[in-house]
Image (cartoon, coloured by chain):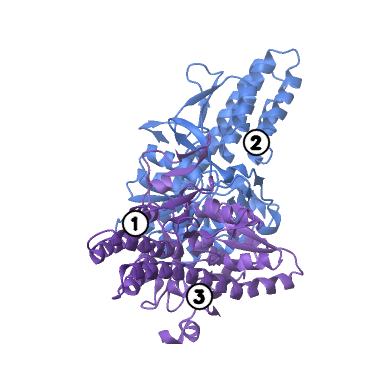
Chain colours: A blue, B purple
């Protein structure tokens, strides 16, 4: 999407030196916009591990480019395969829970594993990296084309008055290669001249809404307002929210959706006020092996310091402030599960369906 | 309640100089514990206005002591009544929305308005200030004696395993003179040796939970864990919350309760998981004139900067960090309304009742 009118992706090959991978450094957003150059596998691993890139789609794509750099490095050693496999393991281990990482690495290993000469292998790795990124962007683009119909219908019903969309966390283009999942219908609506306004949950404790979603929308020009996570229920009670769209980290085959902690509370408020609640996701987010989200999806516990300290800009430096007594305990669950019964629909690259096993399988019959 | 084993109230007459009012300075909690001395009416007004004291009960009590200081100052002028009335207006205007402020000032004016000599008036003002504070503490103590029965019953049912109580914002002793409303049953349970543990919502945007409730519980020795406001639903889904108790800012005669923004979301999650949800309040919090909370209780909009900036301790100084892009809009609603249908019961100084007009009026028949 656009930053000050210029189109960017979150990861791409450097225009002047195609052996260098460019990323938008998300660790210092929203306070500074810096394009970071990754020259080596080691730099790719650190970028993923230290969350200079984050979001399921984006770390998959970055891993794909990392494997391309791995072939270049391997070509300079005596044992191409041994070096490549070591790099593959390092990249896949950069973050342990994200399924896209090992998926992208394995796709590259399968593609590169040919009898062709090394120079050909490097070309295959580059083409595969580009293909992974392009597919991610294309899936997100299609989510937007399907989801925009819901926004269009609300806009017509409101005679062009602003359609107020609430979102939680960052399922924006910064979490993917382009467009995003939850934000893609919003960007498409904006593109079509539909009057949209986004309520951005700040999304404590890591503030991905306040920091990343707000920054995306601001730079693309989409009207938005940041709110404390506590606020959505009040807005819904007073007719100030027309629909909710969030992303998801894992969705079961019956439609239970794990997403950033707090999503469930917004789904409850939407249901209590008869407001449609949608989850937008590329189909890679489905976990076809499980049904009961509450029982079967493991919930990550992160550092308590993310609750006790808040990071932000102070005196032109990025600093952390302590907001609790030093001696108080805190706990930090990363996700919660919204039961399918609270979800109006799932917006995927193949279309929109109800959050039920039957309806999901009608869109994805090969998973029956 | 206790700070490092020593009993404190939030406001009291200085032991060595009874013409000085002591307060716990809440503006710098939880990072520093400082007792601030108020010598003049002007200092009382500033302490209330700048939130060195806050909370409905506490600002009422502080206003009572302020009026006592006003009689001392008035005695040194030529026109006692004129000076006293000017002070009364200044104190009542220190914060515009809090009903306890003008209530305490008017109670003092009525008490002082006698034909007695000035020295007698000063004594009356001092006695009335102490009475206002004592009554506030006594009402809160009684809330604890009634509410503890609910905790005791859960504790028995759990065979002494920890009773997990979730609370939102600070309706603790720091918001009153002693005990608090929502926390009073917790302190009483702790006093009786019941195994209790409190989940403390941090309560963005002003973090009264992370800053004040956690500090109270820590200093009194009550086990507690600070959580992001997003977390309560997940805890409830997984059987980790036995009951919710919050305070309230205004409760209608049918039991709709305005409280800190986000309370409604926790009430929805409690209802969805069959967890009892209680509001604890002294009867002064009832607004007997209104019924429909959603339509009739005005909701304060506060500065957007409270959303955009977070205050805390950094390098041993209290600093603010920016967490959004500078150019993004934010909005800050202070309260939301929890409909009576989501409230299991109201814990008052007269006992516990259902959140319905009929049941409330059985406890308060004089309001029929």
- Helix, strand or loop at mark 1: helix
- For the residue carrying disc 1, how many other residues have a C-alpha within 10 Å: few (<14), some (14-19), or many (20+)? many
Residue under numbered circle 1: B41
Image side of residue A353 versus residue B308, left or right: right
* Image position, residue A281 (x, y; %): 55, 48
Residue under numbered circle 3: B341
Q: CA distance from mark 3 to mark 2?
A: 47 Å
- Helix, strand or loop at mark 3: helix
* Image position, residue B157 (x, y; %): 73, 73
* Image position, residue A213 (x, y; %): 46, 43
Q: Chain of mark 2?
A: A
- For the residue carrying disc 3, how many other residues have a C-alpha within 10 Å: few (<14), some (14-19), or many (20+)? some
- Badges 3 and 1, same chain: yes
Contact between labelled residues 1 and 2, with CB atoms less than 8 Å apart: no
Q: Chain of mark 1?
A: B
Image side of residue A192 versus residue A145, left or right: left
**With respect to residue B109, does A284 lie above or below?**
above
Picture residue at 47% right of the left edge, 27% below the top: A34
Q: Chain of mark 3?
A: B
Residue under numbered circle 2: A101
Q: Nearer the viewer, mark 3 or mark 2?
A: 3
Q: Quadrant of the N terminus of chain A?
A: top left
- Badges 3 and 2, same chain: no
């Amino acid at each position: 999407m656009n930053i000050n009118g210029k189109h960017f992706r979150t990861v791409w090959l450097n225009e002047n030196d195609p052996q260098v991978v460019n990323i938008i450094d998300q660790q210092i957003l929203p306070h500074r916009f810096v394009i970071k150059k990754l020259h080596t596998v080691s730099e790719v691993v650190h970028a993923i591990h230290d969350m200079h890139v984050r979001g399921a789609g984006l770390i998959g794509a970055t891993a794909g480019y990392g494997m391309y750099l791995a072939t270049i490095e391997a070509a300079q050693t005596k044992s191409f395969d041994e070096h490549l496999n070591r790099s593959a393991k390092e990249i896949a281990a950069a973050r342990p829970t994200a399924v896209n990482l090992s998926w992208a690495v394995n796709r590259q290993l399968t593609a590169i594993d040919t009898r062709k000469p090394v120079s050909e292998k490097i070309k295959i790795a580059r083409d595969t990296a580009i293909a992974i990124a392009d597919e991610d962007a294309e899936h997100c683009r299609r989510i937007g084309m399907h989801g925009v119909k819901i926004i269009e219908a609300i806009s017509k019903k409101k005679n062009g008055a602003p359609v107020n969309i609430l979102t939680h966390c960052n399922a924006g283009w910064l979490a993917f290669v382009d467009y995003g999942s939850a934000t893609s219908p919003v960007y498409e609506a904006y593109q079509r001249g539909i009057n949209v306004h986004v309520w951005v949950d700040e999304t404590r404790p890591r503030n991905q809404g306040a920091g990343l979603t707000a920054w995306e929308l601001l730079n693309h020009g989409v009207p938005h307002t940041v709110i404390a996570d506590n606020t959505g229920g009040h807005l819904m009670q007073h007719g100030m929210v027309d629909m909710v769209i969030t992303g998801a980290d894992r969705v079961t085959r019956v439609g239970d959706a794990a997403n950033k902690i707090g999503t469930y509370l917004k789904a409850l408020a939407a249901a209590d006020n008869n407001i449609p609640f949608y989850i937008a996701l590329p189909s890679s987010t489905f976990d076809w092996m499980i049904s009961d989200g509450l029982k079967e999806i493991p919930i990550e516990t992160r550092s308590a310091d993310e609750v006790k300290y808040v990071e932000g800009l102070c005196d032109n430096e990025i600093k952390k402030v302590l907001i609790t007594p030093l001696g108080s305990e805190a706990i930090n669950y990363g996700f919660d599960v919204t039961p399918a019964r609270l979800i109006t629909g799932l917006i995927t690259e193949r279309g929109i369906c109800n959050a039920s096993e039957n309806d999901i399988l009608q869109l994805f019959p090969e998973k029956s």
